[in-house]
């Protein structure tokens, strides 16, 4: 999520302007860990979220997060 914050900032947005996230997990057993980190980042009024388990992620990744955010 640190990388997402940097990408949002470079695009003229911020984590506070995220309106929707989709989280892709290679293993649903990681949900609690991911949810705790998500809660640390989105503390006030978290955006709408979908979380799905997938068969595989690129480069052997365990978690992928997609965001939709507003820009000025």
Image (cartoon, helix red, strand yellow):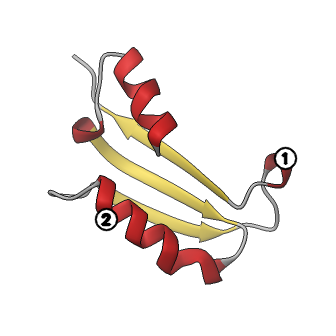
Q: Residues within 10 Å of mark 2 (few under 14, many from 20)?
A: few
Please provide percent x and percent y for residue 9. 35, 22
Q: Is residue 68 left or right of residue 63?
A: left
Q: Residue at x 28, y 31 (%)?
A: 14
Residue 18 occupies quadrant: top left
- The correct choice, above or below, for 6 with respect to 28 in the image is above
- The correct choice, above or below, for 24 with respect to 10 in the image is below
Q: Quadrant of the C terminus?
A: top left
Whole-angstrom CA distance, mark 1 to mark 2, is 26 Å
- The correct choice, above or below, for 32 with respect to 13 in the image is below
* Mark 1 / mark 2, whichever is N-terminal: 2
Q: Is residue 2 left or right of residue 15?
A: right
Q: Is residue 46 left or right of residue 20?
A: left
- The correct choice, above or below, for 3 with respect to 12 in the image is below
Q: Residue at x 40, y 16 (%)?
A: 10
Q: Residues within 10 Å of mark 1 (few under 14, many from 20)?
A: few
In the rendered structure, are the residues bearing label 1 and label 2 in contact, judged by CB atoms less than 8 Å apart?
no
- Which residue is the site of mark 2? 39
Please provide percent x and percent y for residue 16. 22, 40
- Which residue is the site of mark 1? 59
Quick one: SS at disc 2?
helix
Please provide percent x and percent y for residue 11. 39, 17
**Residue at the left extreme of this rendering:** 44
Quick one: SS at disc 1?
helix
Q: Residue at x 75, y 54 (%)?
A: 61
Residue in front for this viewpoint, 20 or 57 = 57
**How many numbered marks does the figure carry?**
2
Name the mark on residue 38: none
Q: Residue at x 81, y 47 (%)?
A: 58
């Amino acid at each position: 999520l640190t990388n997402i914050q940097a990408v949002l900032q470079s695009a003229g947005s911020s984590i506070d302007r995220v309106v929707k996230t989709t989280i892709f997990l290679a293993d649903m057993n990681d949900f609690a860990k991911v949810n705790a980190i998500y809660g640390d980042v989105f503390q006030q009024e978290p955006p709408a979220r979908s979380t799905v388990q997938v068969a595989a992620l690129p480069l052997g990744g365990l978690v992928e997060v997609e965001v939709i955010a507003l820009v000025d």
